Image (cartoon, rainbow, N blue to C red):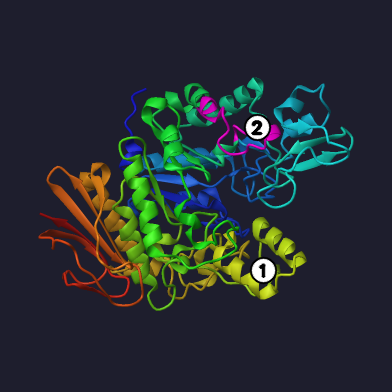
C-alpha cells in the first residue's frame, strides 16, 4: 500500500457525536446527524472527521468505556448508519477517523465479564490483576480520576488495575492473545474504509504497574511497532496518539516515519500553562503569552524533519479556547480569529473542535448539580472533603471543566439551537448570536477566517514544509514567527492581548502580499486589540 501522507496537508475536524446533531429527537446527537451535516463540513474545507467514540458503552466516561468494539452504541444509530457515513463522507473527499480506546475497556465488556470467572478463564489474563498486600491495595498507584487505581473483587480475592474509573479496567498488553484480539478488531474497522485512528491515552499501554510506571513504559514503542505492522501500517491512513506525557524527544520516537509507529501525537505541554506548577489542572494561574510562544516554538523546531506536530486549541476534554485564552465578551470574534491565525500557519496538522469555527464559548454553572462530567464531579467531592469552598471549586470547573466543550453544537437561533427537538442531554448555550446560520451569513465571521486558513494551507506549501523561526517584537504580548521555504517567506504577527500594543522588528519586512488579517490590510507599528495577520514578505 502506497503511503501518501495526505494528512500533512489536511485540516481535521473533531466531532463529539453526542453533542453534534440529533435526528431522532432523543436529545443525543447521532450518526445520521453527522451525515446530514457533511455539506457544511465540506464547505468549511476539512478533509477528515475525528469522531469521539460511538461504540456500545454504558457511558460511565461518555463512551471512553467501550463494552463492544464492533457494535455502534444504540444512542448513535446502527452499523448501517456508520457505513453510510463513511461512504457519504468519501464522496465529499472526507475521511472518518475513529477514536479508539485500547488501554482499557468497560467492565461490562464480555472480556472482563469472563475474566471475573477467575484465573482459569483465558480472559482473566486480558486484564491486570494483583493480590493485595496485608489486606491493602497492591501499591500506591492512583487513578487519573482520583483515588486508588486498584479495585478489589472479593470473590477472587484479587485487585484489578484501572488508571481511570473503576468501570474502566486496564487491558494487559503483556498478553499476546489480548493483543491479537485488539489487532483483529482494528483490522475490522480498517477494512470498512476508515481514514485512521485517534488512539486514546496510548502512552499508557506499556505500563509496568509493579514498578509504578504508567506512561512511556520501556516496551511502549515495541508494542506500537507491532500494532503498526499488524494493522494500520498496511493502509494509507493516519494515526494520532494521545500522549499527555510526551516531550519533543519522545514525540520523535512516535512520529519519525522510519520507526513505523504513529503519524503524530497530541502533546499537551501548551495546555498545562495556565495551571500552577506541580498542581492539578484545577489550580489556576494566568497564561503568560511568552511562555505559550516558547512552548509552541520549541515543538516546531525540535520536531522539524524528525516527526510531525498536531496543532490544536480545543478538544472534548478542554474548555473553549476563546473563554480560556481569548476574550469571550467584547472581543469574542477578534480574539477567536487571532488564536486561529496564530496556530494555523505552524507546521503540523491542525484540528478544529466542533463549534470552534463559530466561536462557541464556555457554559458557566452555579451548582455541581448542573455538572455531568465524571472528572469534575470527582474533583468536587474530593475538594469538598478537603475544605475547599463551593465558590473556589465552581470557579475551577467553569474555567477548566470538560463539560464546557460538550454542550450541544449551535446551528441556529431557534429552540435548542437547532441541535434537537427533544430535551438535550446537556443544556444548550446562548445561540442568539453564536450559531452556524449567523456565521455563514456574515462574510467577515470567524467561520470564514477558518475557511480561508484551510484554503491557504492547500495553496501555500511553505506552511506545510517551511522552516520555523521566532521573530522578536520587543513586546512580550506581541508574538511573531516566520515560515520559510526557499525564497518564499510568510510572517505571522499577533497581539495576544485586549489592549493596543506597540512593537518593533529588528528589520522591517517588505510586503509581497497580504494572506489574512482580522483588521485592515495596513501595516503600522501598533496592533489593535487581538489584531493578527499573516503576510508574504520579500
Q: Residue 321: which quarter of the image?
A: bottom left
Q: Would you say residue 256 is visible in this rendering? A: yes
Magenta residues span 205-224
Q: Which mark is residue 370?
A: 1
Q: Would you say residue 360 is visible in this rendering? A: no
Between 410 and 170, which is closer to the camera in this rendering? 170
Locate residue 290 relative to residue 271 in the image: left or right. Answer: left
215 to 338, vertically: above or below:
above
Residue name at image x 30 percent, y 42 percent: 9
Is the N terminus in the top left, top right, bottom left or bottom right quadrant? top left
Between 410 and 537, which is closer to the camera in this rendering? 537
Is the C terminus in the top left, top right, bottom left or bottom right quadrant? bottom left
Residue name at image x 37 percent, y 66 percent: 336
- Look at mark 2 in the image and give the residue it sits on: 208
* Image location (x, y in percent) of residue 247: 46, 43
Locate residue 254 relative to residue 180 in the image: left or right. Answer: left
Residue name at image x 65 percent, y 38 percent: 104
Task: Assign a secondary structure to mark 1.
Answer: helix
Between 32 and 54, which is closer to the camera in this rendering? 54
Amino acid at each position: 500500500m502506497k503511503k501518501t501522507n495526505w494528512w500533512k496537508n489536511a485540516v481535521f475536524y473533531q466531532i463529539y457525536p453526542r453533542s453534534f446533531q440529533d435526528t431522532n429527537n432523543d436529545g443525543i446527537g447521532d450518526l445520521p446527524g453527522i451525515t446530514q451535516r457533511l455539506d457544511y463540513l465540506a464547505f468549511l474545507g476539512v478533509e477528515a472527521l475525528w469522531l469521539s467514540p460511538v461504540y456500545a458503552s454504558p457511558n460511565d466516561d461518555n463512551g471512553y468505556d467501550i463494552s463492544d468494539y464492533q457494535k455502534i452504541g444504540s444512542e448513535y444509530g446502527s452499523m448501517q448508519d456508520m457505513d453510510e457515513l463513511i461512504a457519504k463522507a468519501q464522496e465529499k473527499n472526507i475521511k472518518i477517523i475513529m477514536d479508539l480506546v485500547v488501554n482499557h475497556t468497560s467492565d461490562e465488556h464480555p472480556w472482563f465479564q469472563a475474566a471475573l470467572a477467575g484465573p482459569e478463564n483465558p480472559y482473566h489474563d486480558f486484564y491486570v490483576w494483583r493480590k493485595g498486600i496485608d489486606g491493602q491495595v497492591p501499591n500506591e498507584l492512583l487513578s487519573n480520576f482520583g483515588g486508588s487505581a486498584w479495585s478489589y473483587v472479593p470473590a477472587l480475592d484479587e485487585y484489578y488495575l484501572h488508571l481511570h474509573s473503576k468501570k474502566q479496567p486496564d487491558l494487559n498488553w503483556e498478553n499476546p492473545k489480548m493483543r491479537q484480539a485488539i489487532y483483529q478488531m482494528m483490522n475490522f474497522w480498517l477494512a470498512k474504509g476508515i481514514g485512521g485512528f485517534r488512539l486514546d491515552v496510548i502512552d499508557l499501554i506499556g505500563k509496568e504497574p509493579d514498578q509504578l510506571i504508567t506512561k512511556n513504559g520501556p516496551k511502549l514503542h515495541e508494542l506500537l511497532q507491532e500494532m503498526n505492522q499488524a494493522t494500520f501500517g498496511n493502509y494509507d491512513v493516519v494515526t494520532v496518539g494521545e500522549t499527555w506525557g510526551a516531550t519533543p524527544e519522545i514525540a520523535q520516537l512516535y512520529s519519525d516515519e522510519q520507526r513505523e509507529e504513529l503519524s503524530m501525537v497530541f502533546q499537551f505541554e501548551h495546555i498545562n500553562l495556565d495551571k500552577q506548577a506541580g498542581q492539578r489542572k484545577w489550580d489556576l494561574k494566568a497564561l503568560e503569552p511568552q511562555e505559550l510562544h516558547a512552548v509552541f516554538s520549541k515543538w516546531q523546531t525540535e520536531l522539524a524533519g524528525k516527526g510531525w506536530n498536531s496543532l490544536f486549541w480545543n478538544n472534548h476534554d478542554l474548555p473553549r479556547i476563546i473563554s480560556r485564552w481569548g476574550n469571550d465578551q467584547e472581543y469574542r470574534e477578534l480574539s477567536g480569529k487571532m488564536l486561529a491565525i496564530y496556530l494555523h500557519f505552524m507546521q503540523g496538522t491542525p484540528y478544529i473542535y466542533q463549534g470552534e469555527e463559530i466561536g462557541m464559548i464556555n457554559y458557566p454553572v452555579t451548582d455541581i448539580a448542573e455538572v455531568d462530567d465524571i472528572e469534575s464531579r470527582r474533583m468536587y467531592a474530593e475538594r469538598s472533603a478537603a475544605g475547599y469552598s463551593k465558590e473556589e471549586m465552581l470557579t475551577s470547573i467553569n474555567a477548566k471543566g470538560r463539560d464546557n466543550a460538550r454542550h450541544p453544537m449551535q446551528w441556529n437561533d431557534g429552540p435548542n439551537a437547532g441541535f434537537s427537538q427533544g430535551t438535550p442531554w446537556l443544556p444548550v448555550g446562548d445561540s442568539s448570536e453564536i450559531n452556524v446560520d449567523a456565521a455563514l451569513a456574515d462574510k467577515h465571521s470567524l467561520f470564514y477566517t477558518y475557511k480561508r486558513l484551510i484554503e491557504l494551507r492547500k495553496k501555500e506549501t511553505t506552511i506545510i514544509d517551511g522552516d520555523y523561526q521566532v521573530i522578536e517584537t520587543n513586546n512580550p504580548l506581541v508574538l511573531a514567527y516566520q515560515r520559510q521555504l526557499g525564497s518564499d517567506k510568510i510572517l505571522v504577527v499577533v497581539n495576544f492581548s485586549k489592549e493596543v500594543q506597540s512593537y518593533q522588528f529588528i528589520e522591517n519586512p517588505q510586503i509581497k502580499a497580504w494572506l489574512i488579517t482580522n483588521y485592515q490590510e495596513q501595516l503600522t507599528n501598533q496592533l489593535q486589540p487581538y489584531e493578527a495577520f499573516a503576510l508574504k514578505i520579500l
